[in-house]
Amino acid sequence: MSSADPGSFQRYALHGRTFYVKRDDLLDPLLSGNKYWKLYTLLHTPSESYQRIVSYGGSQSNAMLAIAALCAKKGWQFHYYCKPLAAYLKEEPSGNLKLALALDMHLHTLEHAQYATGIAALEADKDQGCLLIRQGAADPLAAAGMQALAKNIKVWQGQQSIERLRVVTPSGTGTTAYYLACAMPDVQVVTTAVVGDAHYLRAQMQQLGALPDNITMLEADKKRHFAKPYRELLTMYHQLREAGIEFDLIYGASMWYTLLQHLNVMGDDTLLYLHSGGLSGNPTMLERYQRKGW
Ligand SMILES: *Cc1c(COP(=O)(O)O)cnc(C)c1O
């Protein structure tokens, strides 16, 4: 495995084709990948601007951990709301939850029946000095960070004299792909829906604004549930690792798996995969695979 500078571009050979990978996984151990860029504006906001950050979502979310790391750097209090924890997690927090709690995240659980109204109330309850970040940082504040990322990519593209470039990145909320496509209209952004399907992803993006026409959404070969173990994704993960880079088992493995099935429509375009981070979630995912005996 060749070493790389944080955020650098690395040549990557896989299945007989050459790709480039932007190593945003190396930007910071906890605030890495696309979460670094989504939170870029806040990272450059003076500490005095806020006392408290509030957010909500899954109890092993990568966004949760990234916001916890951001708040620790900034000296902001972080309050996070989620549904009741599974018994084993409550007993012994693991993975991203353990890391975020170690960064002094204040965790609040809401009963399933109260969750929707509880989350809606967060918006109404916030006061001066408090910022509410939407689930997964699917927030308009991500736009400026994606412009910075786009600039970064355009400089590299110029240096390499690449005429036809496609940038590949997996989608959860679609915020990364959406704002990136808006920021670089002459580059195709290739993505796939890891949460729900293409129809759901399109609807998510349309909440952010009109859909730009430089987004290619690749369809997965079958419906997969978010963050569930699948043999083919584990195999993909190992192949990627053997080729020299570790990707996360949820988004990264799915994106590569689907991308490799659609290489024929990519022509000779240069493919740049943006490493979206998320490696901190791999140990708990690998344990789940192990428990299945795979
Ligand atoms: C959050 C995340 C994504 C999805 O980003 P969106 O902007 O929500 O589409 C992709 N990959 C990894 C590793 C993530 O943590």
Image (cartoon, rainbow, N blue to C red):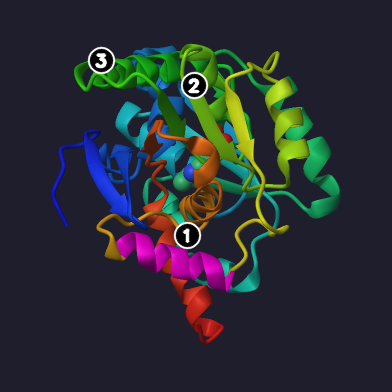
Using the image, determine if residue 262 lies above or below residue 184. Answer: below
Q: Is 69 placed left or right of 256 in the picture?
A: left
Q: Residues within 10 Å of mark 2 (few under 14, many from 20)?
A: many
Disc 1 marks which residue?
A: 249
Residue drawn at x 64%, y 61% as measured from the top left: 85
Magenta-drawn stretch contains 236: yes
Residue at the extreme bottom:
293
| Picture coordinates of residue 252, whole percent (x, y) | 46, 51
Residue drawn at x 37%, y 21% as measured from the top left: 149
Read off the magenta span. 230-241
SS of the residue under disc 2: helix
Give the CA distance from mark 3 to mark 2: 17 Å
Disc 2 marks which residue?
A: 180
Quadrant holding the N terminus: bottom left
Q: Is there CB contact under 8 Å for labels 3 and 1?
A: no
* Residue 251 visible in this rendered orientation of the protein: yes
At label 2, which amino acid type do we have? Leu
Disc 3 marks which residue?
A: 158
| Picture coordinates of residue 191, whole percent (x, y) | 56, 37
Using the image, determine if residue 225 lies above or below residue 76. Answer: below
Q: Is 269 or 45 nearer to us in this picture?
A: 269
Q: Residues within 10 Å of mark 1 (few under 14, many from 20)?
A: many
At label 1, which amino acid type do we have? Leu
The answer to which quarter of the image holds residue 165 is top left
